[in-house]
Amino acid sequence: MASNFFDDSQTNLAEYTVSEISGSIKRTVEDAFGHVRIRGEISGYRGPHSSGHAYFALKDDRARIEAVVWRGVFGRLKFKPEEGMEMIATGKVTTYPGSSKYQIVIDSLEPAGAGALMALLEERRRKLAAEGLFDEARKQLLPHMPKVIGVVTSPTGAVIRDILHRITDRFPVHVIVWPVRVQGETSGDEVAAAIRGFNALRPGDPIARPDVLIVARGGGSLEDLWGFNDEAVVRAAADSDIPLISAVGHETDWTLIDYAADVRAPTPTGAAEMAVPVKAELEAGIATLSARLSGSMSRGLDGSRQKLHALARALPSIDMLLALPRRRFDESAAGLGRALRLNTANKRQVFERRASQLTPATLQRRVLEERQRIGELGSRAERQMERRADRSTARLSNAAARLTLRPATERIARNHDRLKMLAGRSGELISLLSERRRRQLQEATRLLNSMSYRNVLKRGYAVVRGTDARAVDRAAALSSGDAVSLEFADGRVHAVTTDEAKPARAKPVAKKLEKKTSRTSKDQGSLF
């Protein structure tokens, strides 16, 4: 009875396929829950899949639910999932029929309260600090007087007006604004793109490259400022080649870009004050330094002038300094003429003594002596050769008696060759000695000719000789009517002395002497 009842109940149940029951469950779950907010800890997150989707799970201490973020949604998330972070996920609960699992398709993620957000911020800060993005060695110095300033901020807020007003008051320069959203899901990417865009500018581009950058935003909550904690913004600020000033929020607000920036300003107005100096203060400082420079130069010149006057008074006068050298000069000048005459006389005596030793008779005698010596040497050489030939002949004769005819003949032939060789060598020796003596004779002859008075006659002079053929060296030695002979370079002529020289014959000589004297005095000056 019980068995029949059981069979009837099974027969009355509706029959479903796996796909039908899975679809029914899916529709039931989606209709019952719709969009929900689930709070839990992210588990099993390994980054986006190769398809761009992200798969992980949300769990608490008692349960676990699978989660998926499609590729299009993942790129728009303000807060990206991180392993172990407690998050609040908003999305639609559904099932996955392929594995009979339910899951949540996430549309947005946000930290579970301020504590979780701060924990995420601290974790990101430690990660970026470990990479060295916050090191002081990366910081750059701000330029003292920039010509162009780039500002990354919202173009409609009060921040940009405060920055422009402050720069205009202090030191007007060219300002380029890169408009970005400073709040929202895309603010981080836009700020990072603006920083990289300014760095991509080059000198000579239509848009001037800034000398310094200011990234600014007004105050707000941690969620409002979260875009400046974005990892892309921090990396762009750290990699910036242009010095960067961060001015995000109020003085008490800190974001990760403040650590990566070269300088942090407490407010956007403070960033403008850091970027440019006060023009009026610079002008006043220049005026003060100019006045101090002028005063110091005047005082220095006055002091140097006083020292110069004191030193000038301590120095002796020019007349005192030159008195002793002048006296020495005068004494030397007075004795110069006498010394020159004495030196000339000494040189003349030496010259005459040397000339007296080089007479033609002396040279001829030396030539004869050398010729005799050469003849004697030649005779001695001939006699010596004859004696050698006699001795060789005697030795050959003695050897012939002791040797047979054939060896004696060979020895005689060898001695005869040797004798001819010695005779040739003696002839060469005699020729060499004769040539050497001939060269010495030629050199002596050239020396005699160079010292001969005939070379002086070739220059236009003449030797006056008396009736005894001796040279007359003074006019007082002749009287009127004396017969003299004048020896020139090409011959001799006879003449008779008179009381006065004829002007016609004296004129060329006088002109020549006058020309020589004028040239001497022009080139060298008189020695006496």
Image (spheres, grey):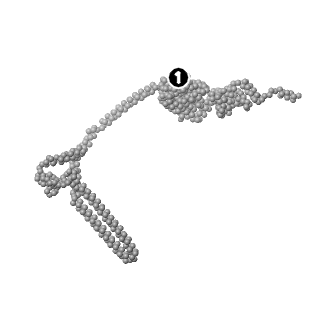
Residue 516 in view in this figure = yes
> Can you give x and y, in whole percent of width and height, for residue 423 in the image?
33, 68
Residue 58 in view in this figure = no
Q: Nearer the viewer, residue 59 or 147?
A: 147
Q: Residues within 10 Å of mark 1 (few under 14, many from 20)?
A: some
Q: Nearer the viewer, residue 418 or 315?
A: 418
* Left or right relative to 108: residue 241: left
Residue 312, placed above or below residue 94: below
Q: Quadrant of the N terminus?
A: top right
* Left or right relative to 457: residue 25: right
Q: Residue at x 37, y 32 (%)?
A: 300
* Left or right relative to 421: residue 30: right
Quarter of the view holding residue 351: bottom left
Q: Nearer the viewer, residue 76 or 225?
A: 76
Quarter of the view holding residue 409: bottom left
Circle 1: element type: helix
> Can you give x and y, in whole percent of width and height, for residue 237 in the image?
55, 31
Q: Nearer the viewer, residue 165 or 414?
A: 414
**Residue that badge 1 annotates:** 161
Q: Residue furthest left?
A: 481
Q: How many numbered marks, from 0 up?
A: 1
Mark 1 belongs to which amino acid?
Answer: Arg
> Can you give x and y, in whole percent of width and height, for residue 111 in the image?
64, 28
Q: Residue at x 57, y 35 (%)?
A: 132
Q: Residue at x 43, y 27 (%)?
A: 285
> Can you give x and y, in whole percent of width and height, for residue 413 in the image?
37, 72
Q: Residue at x 65, y 34 (%)?
A: 50
